[in-house]
Amino acid sequence: MRVDRKIAWFVILGLVTVCLCAQIVAPANYAKQFREAPNSAPSKHFLLGTDDLGRDRFSRLLYGGRVSLLLAPAAALLSTCLAAGLGTVAGYSGGIVARIIMGAVDLFLSLPWFFLLITVRATLPLDVSPMTSVTVTFALLGFLGWAASARVVYAGVKALRTSDFITTARSCGCIPWRTLAVHIMPNLKPILWAQFLVSIPAFILAEANLTMLGLGVAEPLPSWGSLLRELENYDNLSSQPWRLAPLVLLMLVVWGFQALLSHDEVMA
Amino acid sequence: MLIVLVGGILCATLVRFSPGFGIDERELDSRLNSASIAAIRDSHSSNLSLPKFYAKYLRDMLRGQLGMSETFQRPISELMRERSNVSLRSLAWALPGAWILVLSGTILITGIRNRSLDVFSSIVVGGLMATPGAIVALWAASTGRGSGIALILILVPTLYRYTRNILERSFRKMHVMAARARGIGTLPLLVWHVLPAAAPQVIGLVAVSISMAFGALIPVEFICDSPGIGQLALQAALGRDLPLLVTLTMVVTIVTFLANAAADAVNDVMTPLSA
């Protein structure tokens, strides 16, 4: 394994572990307001200081990481499953079914993804509880992010369908479902894994962008996107560099997921 | 064309069935009597039936009328003209700027094949790719750099990575390797062998970059307070402005389709030449 991939695994697994243990590691609850200490600088009580409502930034960073690091992979899994299902059916069956599915893919891809995302997100209720908002945001990412992956899966299945071993299996009387399950799907694993890994950083960044525009995770539940909104007050950044912590962590994680992809997967 | 029409109707369906659609805050004004409230409700009634709305919308569109924006209370054609001028001005130098940076960077790095330069460029591009577009826009707005610079910084890393992969793949082609083995210099190798082989894919990527640029316009124009199409799209989405959203969806789909069709046409001419 390459050194940068080892570092990437170490960074991601380390962060996931720390964020999962937020209830133990974090000094305070993400919503707890220390009203006597708003906007305080880092200290031994508040490692990254407090925000303007007196909430501990370090605790919010850990809880926010839990939201982003658990739900982005869940959304990526959803979109990869959708892409695998639709891409496989289109690639294997061909004909009218393939044309309908690939038409839907073309429709999704003909619109910029972020435009589609804000349009669909804005049609859903905006004044909802934090838990609903976080579920809606990541479910949307999962449901809308499958099209590009489906095209890759479709191309993979189409290539496999005409390969010698599939022709042999079919000539031996292997039924379509068995051919799909036993011969095609296992060969799609590298493609699906690559699509899953590509989707995670894309979804983390999309959530950050959505939340910064006010369409993502609702307060007081933190996500890395909502923590980045603090950077809107850009002028004080040079005197309060610790406010950049969520951005640094987000960039580290996104880099980590990108580094996990092998060179061949990136080239594909 | 079918994709454009289906896209429009899907957008209209989504907005029509969104919670709270058709509710007008003026109905809460206690000074209005029941007749006035009925008149307000009546003004929205044309949008309540989706098939009726869409049929009327398409009929009006064929006559060159795009209807009225409910959020801005202005004709959509007027809004589109005004806003697209602002966005086109940003795109007119951001897209070529991004492509000049990407092409010069990738040609230099794949041509020179210097390990430290390659690592440096990978770090810069990786860092930019890992930064949310909204943060780049925020930085541009706070430092007075403008939306064009933000767009370039958002577009360059993705385009760079794709273009570099395309050029690398071209470098690995058999005829390029054979030419290299014969001792052809880097510059002639690039000009006569690598770039012609990569051209069709790069042209395809140019078409994709137009769609990418529109996606990037939304956070950039909203955060930089630049009154363009991107800001209009977000305001239309937030205001659930059905006629404006349908128009924007169709315009964006048509632009993407035209860009792809133009790239295909250029590719049809280029592919035999590069072969």
Image: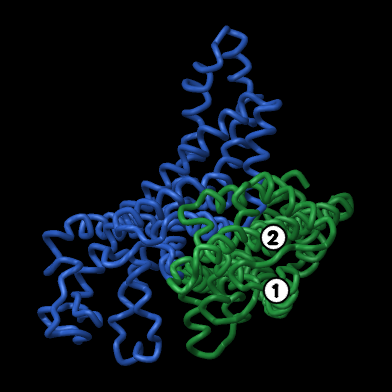
Is residue B174 at least partly visible in the picture? yes
Look at 30% across and 60% down and name the residue there: A11
- Whole-percent x and y of residue A80? 47, 41
Q: Is residue B222 above or below residue A204?
A: below
Look at 46% across and 37% down and name the residue there: A81
Neighbour class for label 2 at 10 Å: few (<14), some, many (≥20)?
many
Q: Chain of mark 1?
A: B
Q: CA distance from mark 1 to mark 2?
A: 11 Å
Q: Is residue A16 above or below residue B134?
A: above
- Which residue is under mark 2? B247
Which tint was used for chain B? green
Who is closer to the viewer here, A139 or B93? A139
Who is closer to the viewer here, A95 or B20? B20
Q: Are marks 1 and 2 on the same chain?
A: yes
Who is closer to the viewer here, A217 or A8? A217
Which tint was used for chain A? blue
Is residue B163 at least partly visible in the picture? no
Q: Chain of mark 2?
A: B
Look at 33% across and 60% down and name the residue there: A7
- Whole-percent x and y of residue A84? 51, 35
Residue B79 shows which numbered tag?
1
User: Between disc 1 and disc 2, whose residue precedes?
Assistant: 1
- Whole-percent x and y of residue B30? 43, 71
Look at 57% across and 7% down and name the residue there: A173
Residue B266 shows which numbered tag?
none
Residue type for callout 2? Thr
Residue type for callout 1? Leu
Neighbour class for label 1 at 10 Å: few (<14), some, many (≥20)?
some
| Label 1 secondary element | helix
| Label 2 secondary element | helix
